[in-house]
Image (cartoon, rainbow, N blue to C red):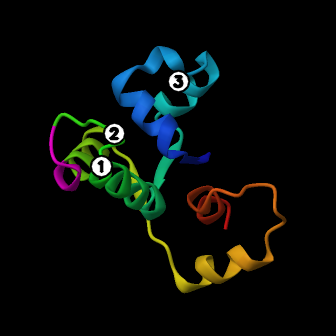
Amino acid sequence: MNVLVDTHVWIWSLADPNRLSPECRRLLSSSRNVIYLSAASAWELAIKDALGKIELPEPVETYVPTRMARQGITALPITHTHALTVSTLPPHHRDPFDRFLIA
């Protein structure tokens, strides 16, 4: 199964896995699943880091790629198609990062 993780889910999986449901932990740990982290999540973390809204144990520019590699997570890029698809989404989510993830 392909699994795209939300930014907070990914951070919790690293810092405090008990915040995740047992089902979520099972999905993330199964070798049968391909886990993806969107460039939108890296962008969100970079912004939160620059604003002092998140504290990471090392600079965000090394934290994200090293942790992704350690967990075997696949990078998911943002394309122009994703950016443009955002305009067609219903207004269920106002958060721009969540809208990118959905697109």
Magenta residues (range): 58-62
Q: Dot 3, how many residues are within 10 Å of its Cα: few (below 14), some (14-19), or many (20+)? A: some
Element on which disc 1 rests: helix
Q: Residue at point 18% right, 34% down?
A: 57
Q: Which mark is residue 49?
A: 1
Q: Which mark is residue 79?
A: none
What quarter of the picture does the C terminus occupy? bottom right
In this rendering, the answer to whether 76 lies above or below 1 is below
Residue 90, position as x, y percentages in the image: 84, 65
Could you tell whether 86 is left or right of 12 in the image? Answer: right
Q: Which residue is mark 3?
A: 25
Q: Which residue is mark 2?
A: 54
Residues at marks 2 and 1, CA–CA distance in whole angstroms:
5 Å
Q: CB under 8 Å between callouts 2 and 1? A: yes
Front position among marks 2 and 3: 2
Residue 51, position as x, y percentages in the image: 32, 51
Residues at marks 1 and 3, CA–CA distance in whole angstroms:
25 Å
